[in-house]
């Protein structure tokens, strides 16, 4: 399955994982072994803090998680072989209140995020009520980025040509993808 992992999902309690991958198999056709990638789905895989030493089972797939890094190992020829390394994600939620923003202006709010490093990828989720219960919020946009180590900047831009926008107070969720 090396380099053919399409989906990795860790449950909220960090105790089990699901993996969807493509496994190369050969099928005999017209006198020739033809390679095909077939879907392979693994569920309920336990997550370890280190590679377990209690099993010698060939072909066993193991998921380890150390801090925010997920590593997959496959047992082949009596050795644990790393077959995939995935950056972890960390999520933080803040209650924020942007002030009224004039036409074609913006406002930044900087929040402290302990595990972020300048340059990390940041995904931003905005509670719908921030826009739906705010005033003149049809033309606003929100952006977020890791502006420095331990800080994320969240920017609200008023793209309106006419109205001052006043977003309501609400929840903002930041997901950090350590790369």
Image (tube, rainbow, N blue to C red):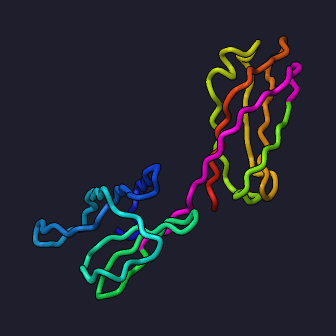
Residue at screen point 50% across, 65% down = 70
User: x, y (%) of residue 107?
Assistant: 86, 32
Residue at screen point 21% across, 68% down = 34
Left or right, 13 with respect to 116, comes to left
Left or right, 134 with respect to 4, comes to right
**Viewer-proximal residue among 46 and 160:** 46
User: x, y (%) of residue 12?
Assistant: 46, 49
- Determine which quarter of the picture holds residue 124: top right
Residue 87, above or below 125 = below
Quarter containing the C terminus: bottom right
Residue at screen point 32% across, 70% down = 61
User: x, y (%) of residue 108?
Assistant: 84, 36
Q: How many marks?
A: 0
- Determine which quarter of the picture holds residue 4: bottom left
User: x, y (%) of residue 173?
Assistant: 64, 39
Residue 161, above or below 15 = above
Left or right, 141 with respect to 14, comes to right
Residue 9, above or below 76 = above
The range drawn in magenta is 83-106
Residue 89 among those drawn in magenta: yes
Residue at screen point 41% across, 77% down = 51
**Viewer-proximal residue among 81 and 93:** 93
Residue 17, above or below 80 = above
Residue 173 among those drawn in magenta: no
Left or right, 152 with respect to 102, comes to left
């Amino acid at each position: 399955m090396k380099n053919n992992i399409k989906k990795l999902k860790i449950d909220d309690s960090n105790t089990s994982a699901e993996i969807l991958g493509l496994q190369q198999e050969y099928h005999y056709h017209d006198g020739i072994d033809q390679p095909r990638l077939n879907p392979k789905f693994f569920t309920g895989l336990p997550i370890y803090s280190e590679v377990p030493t209690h099993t010698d089972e060939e072909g066993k797939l193991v998921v380890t998680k150390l801090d925010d890094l997920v590593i997959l190992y496959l047992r082949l020829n009596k050795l644990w072989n790393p077959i995939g390394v995935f950056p972890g994600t960390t999520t933080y939620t803040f209650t924020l209140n942007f002030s009224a923003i004039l036409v074609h202006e913006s406002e930044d709010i900087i929040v402290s995020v302990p595990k972020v490093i300048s340059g990390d990828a940041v995904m931003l989720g905005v509670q719908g009520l921030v826009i739906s219960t705010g005033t003149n919020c049809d033309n606003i946009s929100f952006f977020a980025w890791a502006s420095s180590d331990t800080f994320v900047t969240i920017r609200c831009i008023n793209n309106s040509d006419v109205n001052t926008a006043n977003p309501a107070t609400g929840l903002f969720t930041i997901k950090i993808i350590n790369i």
